[in-house]
Image: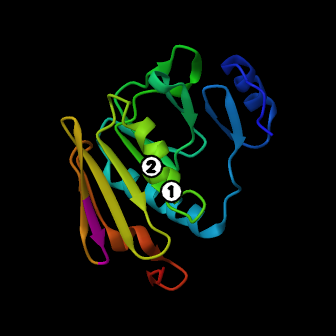
Amino acid sequence: MKNPFTSYPDYLAQERASAHKHEYLRGDVWAMAGGTPEPGRLAMSMGAVLRAALKGKPCVVYSSDVRVRIEATDRSTYPDASVVCGPEQHASDDAEAITNPVVLIEVLSPNTERSDRGEKFAHYQRLSSLQEYVLVSQEAPRVEVFRRQGESWLLTIHERGASVTLPSIGATFTVDEVYFDPRTASPSPT
């Protein structure tokens, strides 16, 4: 049975009252899956690696607690990490949602990979500020970067031992840094 239409103001009221995050698309609202240790670790690792790479730059890394609003498609989501350079811009209908990420990061899971590569990415592409979309694999040490090239997106795949450069924010890091597990003092075997 389809959920009834939810207006965006009603969605925001539900979000403020809820202990769980929900995504929104044109009146449909659904709960986000609960986090598990490995994607949570990888998301925090990406945030830490990016924060270190951005030291001294006017860019801020946000966690998955920050909502991104794509006004052009009436979609709101919580990427695993976001980077905004310069002042934040907020949605006209949602003062707490950012609309100008330069980089978005999603950690792939069996439940989200199809959406992260397809439907969600199609919405993200409508953000004029977005220059790079980063996918982090749980299955293997692999970081995929989709880079805006005019109207197209160029994919580059980086695996163990490789450096990743995000020119839009002037950041460089290695795949091994992202997957480093301090419990074993080596890249995780993922």
Looking at the picture, which amino acid does disc 1 mark? Arg
Could you tell me which residue is drawn at 60 percent across and 60 percent down?
111
Q: Which residues are magenta?
A: 156-160
Would residue 176 be counted in the magenta stretch? no
Q: Is residue 136 left or right of residue 28?
A: left
Per the image, label 2 sits on a secondary structure element best described as loop
Quadrant in the picture for residue 59? top left
Looking at the picture, which amino acid does disc 2 mark? Gly
Task: Residue 85 in the image: state x and y as whole percent.
Answer: 34, 33
Quadrant in the picture for residue 124? top left
Query: Neighbour class for label 1 at 10 Å: few (<14), some, many (≥20)?
Result: few
Could you tell me which residue is drawn at 68 percent across and 48 percent down?
32
Q: Main secondary structure of the magenta part?
A: strand
Q: Which numbered disc covers residue 154?
A: none
Q: Which numbered disc covers residue 118?
A: 2
Query: Neighbour class for label 2 at 10 Å: few (<14), some, many (≥20)?
Result: few
Q: Residue furthest front?
A: 1
Quadrant in the picture for residue 83? top left
Which of 144/121 is in front? 121
Instruction: Identify whether 48 is placed above or below 73.
Output: below
Per the image, label 1 sits on a secondary structure element best described as helix
Dot 1 corresponds to which residue? Answer: 114
Q: Are marks 2 and 1 in contact (CB under 8 Å)?
A: yes
Task: Residue 7 in the image: state x and y as whole percent.
Answer: 70, 19
| Residue 17 seen in the current view | yes
Q: Is residue 14 left or right of residue 39?
A: right
Question: Which quadrant, please, contains the N terminus?
Answer: top right
Q: Is residue 94 left or right of residue 131?
A: right
